[in-house]
Image (spheres, rainbow, N blue to C red):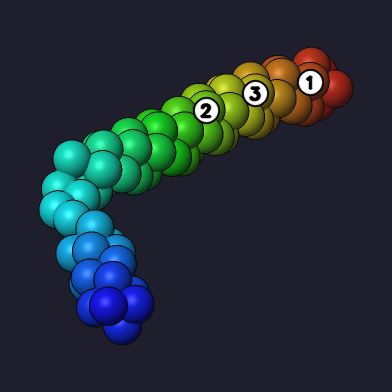
Amino acid sequence: MKKFAVTVAVLALGVAACQDNAADNNVSTVNTIEEEAAADTNAAAAAADEALNDTANLGDAAANAADNAEDAADNAL
């Protein structure tokens, strides 16, 4: 009788371990997608910020070049 009880208990645990975890898996998938989306958004924001900085640097370089040209023209007189 003990063998039968142990066998039933082991089978019950085996069945319990095979439960459908679709809901948990879906939540995990959603969390992963959200984390990846946040990482992509942060990367895009960093790239946009860098592009704006590069544009500002180009504007400063153009202004400096114009100032240098004006100074050179003034010094030539």
Q: Which mark is residue 60?
A: 3
Residue at 27% from the left image edge and 78% from the top image edge: 1
Q: Mark 1 highlights which residue?
A: 71
Mark 3, secondary structure of its residue: helix
Q: Nearer the viewer, residue 40 or 64?
A: 40
Identify the residue at horizontal 34%, vertical 77% (top origin).
2
Give the left or right position of residue 42, taking residue 7 as reference. right
**Relative vertical location of residue 45 with respect to residue 35 in this rendering, above or below:** above
Q: Residue 55: percent from the left, percent from the top?
A: 51, 28
Residue 26 vs 56, above or below: the answer is: below
Dot 2 surroundings within 10 Å: few (below 14), some, or many (20 or more)?
A: few
Residue 44 coordinates in the image, percent (x, y) = 40, 36
The C terminus: image quadrant: top right
Q: Identify residue type, mark 3.
A: Asp
Q: Earlier in the sequence, mark 2 or mark 3?
A: 2
- Marks 1 and 3 sit apart, C-alpha to C-alpha, by 16 Å
Q: Earlier in the sequence, mark 1 or mark 3?
A: 3
Could you classify mark 3 by the number of other residues whose Cα lies within 10 Å: few (under 14), some (14-19), or many (20 or more)?
Answer: few
**Quick one: SS at disc 2?**
helix
Q: State the separation of the CA atoms marked 1 and 2.
A: 33 Å
